[in-house]
Image (spheres, helix red, strand yellow):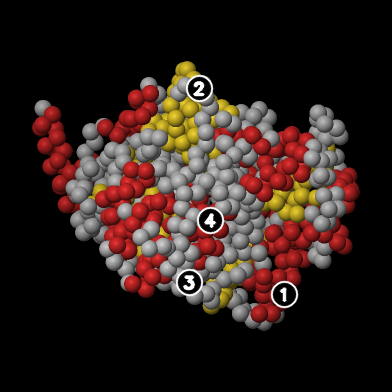
Amino acid sequence: MRLSRREFMTLAGGSTVGAVIFTACGVPADELLVEAPLDVPEDLVKGIDSWFATMDDSGLGVIVRVMEGRAKKIAGNPDYPVNLGKHSVHADAALQALYHPDRVEGPMRRRAEGQPLTRISWDEADGLLRQWMADADGNLAIVTNPVRGGDARIASDVASAFNGRVMFFDPLEQGVLHRAIKTVFNQDRIPDFDIGNARTVLSFGADWLGTWLSPVRFGLKYGDFRGGDKRGFMIHAESRMSLTAAAADRWLTVNPGYEGDLAVSIANVIVSEGLVPATNIAAYSANIPEGELAKWAPSLVAERVGVPAERITEAARRFANDGPSIAFGGGSAGAQTNGVFNLTAIYALNILAGSVGAKGGIQFNPAGAQGLPDSATGASFEEWERELAQWRAGNVKTVITHAVDLVHGFPRSVDVGGALDNVENVVAFTGVLDESSAHANLILPENSYLENWGLDVPEPAPGYEVVGFRQPVVNAPLDTESRARLYDSRSFLDTLLQAAGSRVDVSSVKDFVDNTVDDLFATGRGSVTAGDRRLFMNGVLQRGGWWDVNAGANTEPPSSIPSPIAVAAGPGLSELEDRVEGHVFTIVPFAHQSILDGRNASTPWAQSTPDPITTVAWATWAEINFDKAKELGISEGTWINIRTTAGEITVQAYPHPGISPNVIAIPIGQGRGEGVGGRYAEDRGSNILNILVDKKESETGALAWAATRAIVTKAGGKKEFPKFEGDARDIIRPVEGGVPILIVKPGQTAHEAEEYNHEQHLRFISNKE
Amino acid sequence: MVTAAEKVSGHKWGMAVDVDRCTGCQACVMACQAENNTTLSTEDVYRQKRTFAWIRIERYWYGEFPDVKARFIPIMCQHCENAPCEPVCPVFATYHNTEGMNVQIYNRCVGTRYCGNGCPYNVRFFNYWEPVWPKSLRNQLNPDVTVRSRGIMEKCSFCVQRIRRGVREAARDGRELQDGDIEPACVEACPTNALVFGDYNDADSRVSVMRNDDRKYTLLDKLNTFPNVVYLAQVDATEGATGGHE
């Protein structure tokens, strides 16, 4: 018999519980303890919870609370060296991806172009996949999000077995970053940034506290940076106010594409004023022709860079004088036609500061343990153009995609959909149907990472060897009425391995994990010590990974570097369409704080989490400088057209106090059509990626995704944003200082600041009167 | 008089927020939502200005471009010692327990919303609608936390279910609770360790140390609500700005 709370209370009226309630008037504390939410009868928790360690799909170590076969909570793994128990805003959203009501329930096939998808059995799907892979020997492409470790090895082995290739796709590709790291430090993997021990952090373009690379790890270090004995000073250069720019002590509003000029100008000040040891200057300047650096004197570059000369000088002096210092960058700074110059110039500053290999500086990472792939970056846009040309020409017979939405992520000008339509067999592993699914012949439901085995090597690693282990922690839940599985998904890699059969040495991901455990156990070192292999495996899974703090990189800092200004060039922004009137802006796309590049767009938690700066949720917005918007007659919520030579989108404007007047910044990740992306993402917002112009970084061929110019016009009408806070007009409201955010100067007490604020406030009021 | 609850308690829970470390990343907001089964703030709910967030990040603008700053502060129930929400409740659905927490009894609440009116921090939320999740998403719900029905008020509980579990487990293991044994979901998630939770009765706990920091202040302290959530002021290290006021 099921009892509601109130029915229970009625039945228990004369019992002890009733007596407790009765006496509650006299002794509230006892009664209230009984009535704590945890203890009321209908909330009695049955079953025992278990916490399992695993690895999420962004490289974080997580622990998952599981009760009666259901995942209930995801938290950071306190043991895992990358994130030490912390997690990001999107880690929790994985629960909703797991239990998403629109998850693909089973394999589906499209028998002819234009026909609807029909449900088929896994046996039939496996047969088709096997046949299509075999038929495509030499003409197979496996496309996945950038993966490392065992996932990368297995995908590569399967592709090789069919003489095919693996293509990584990342809409905000990091290839330019890898090239700069290689150029300056001769490293094949991204180093660790020892922010926590730095006194001065100088960063460019990358929103490292929000979405760039490993924001949880960087956040941990940022906490140390702020909370240490001597609070560090942070300078960040970016054209828009990202979370990182907001956290900075000094924000430099650099013009897009001029980050390299800014970095070289900072170097100019350091060298000309002799602020660092001569050996550092020699290492930095070894390959710079005499007199060249003088061309980057702050007074000469300030105008084009967009930062006043005195601010450049101030940054240089602080960077040089108040060490340990570290400089790093990426994101929009690398997403220019001169991206390699920008990033090379930025990372070269570490040579000047002597911070390579030093505490509070750049720490090199070792190669992946047991030869596991330790670095992942998407294929460059240029490589993708070549690949898509092959698809379009009908030279690729089978394309298998996983965890990517190519149609959503590429500029519309490259017509990925058209290319896919010329491929005979398109197999899409996906959780929720996306834009690319419309071009697939076979849809295969993909497991959540919570249901998979896997191995990851984090990038950046924490300065020593780490292997993250992923293990299945839940199975598909059953429908409470029909008792059928809610969805019939499988692991992408296991399905590929099964289709590959004897062509690949391992038969499952679990086999690969077992083999790696054997190898790690045989080393006799690392974080898990056990008497036998079985116990070792248990220990590794319990801790969520294996690491060896003594296995660091054995690399000396370079004694000299290539001239960072050898590739100096200004940014090559896109052309503008003739005969279109309006106002010209440079588009700076950025990853959304919770839905990222769109991978979390299907989950309602990620959609409903407000953007930290604008507080907008469930929508796309265009950040436009507050004063510029006023000048153009644009107010909050005004619909504006953003037109490039590649197309046009209509989006709502958000007048923003923290963005350069010549820049319009738009989050990516939304903009799916009707019936695409699940009920929470469909028909929502706009996709700025689709109208980017295909400008390329000159050295790497990467997409210069922050180099598109647009003409902006009012579209007519406006609509209120779904957002959390008042609008930016709040900037002028006369709130007494310190309410609610009290600000103190270093060494000042809260009480002193409050007294000061109150005096100022009284003066403000009396002046007003 | 020492109540029975005081005999078994001995704790005074509180939270310290170092605003200088907060980056506004929203990890705490999402973690809270996942832990406490809060209803989804849909687009419609946003438009009606009735979003649910037991913890929220408020953003304030300071200065003017290019020296403008966006500053963030996490706001949750302040668990006031002298809570304006408590005396106004006609059915004693909200009360102050002996562990320093302002507690809400969901099944006693009749939805007058007086407490919400009385709260100066705007951290109480009324369920205007029955919470609805698609069937499959109900699998994610935390069984430790009641799903609140339409017509009642709810708010941050300091993750009381975690406190109860922590106390129980320490008792089961026959040991004293250690500082850091209990972490609400927001504290657990916070990447920068801006949020710290603990026992003020433990003089060595991190919250006790932070409560005595020179940068400590409380929100709207002139109202004499004596919150058990304390804040550490943000530091402005740039030269030229005057102390405490921009």
The CA span between labels 3 and 4 is 18 Å
Foreground label between 3 and 4: 3
Label 3 sits on residue: A558
Question: Left or right of A465: which side holds A715?
Answer: left
Label 1 sits on residue: A518
- In the rendered image, residue A548, in percent from the top left (x then y), is placed at 57, 74
Quick one: SS at disc 3? loop
State if disc 4 and disc 1 touch (CB < 8 Å).
no
Label 4 sits on residue: A177
Label 2 sits on residue: A580
Q: Are discs 4 and 2 located on one and the same chain?
A: yes
For the view shown, which residue lies furthest in the front direction?
A290
Foreground label between 1 and 2: 2
Callout 4: residue from which chain? A
Residue type of the residue flagged with mark 4: Leu
Q: Are discs 1 and 3 located on one and the same chain?
A: yes
Foreground label between 1 and 3: 3
Question: Left or right of A440: which side holds B24?
Answer: left
State if disc 4 and disc 3 touch (CB < 8 Å).
no
Q: Quadrant of residue A481?
A: top right
- In the rendered image, residue B112, in percent from the top left (x then y), is placed at 40, 29
Quadrant where the C terminus of chain A is found in the figure: top left
Residue type of the residue flagged with mark 3: Pro
The CA span between labels 1 and 3 is 36 Å
- In the rendered image, residue A161, in percent from the top left (x then y), is placed at 82, 59
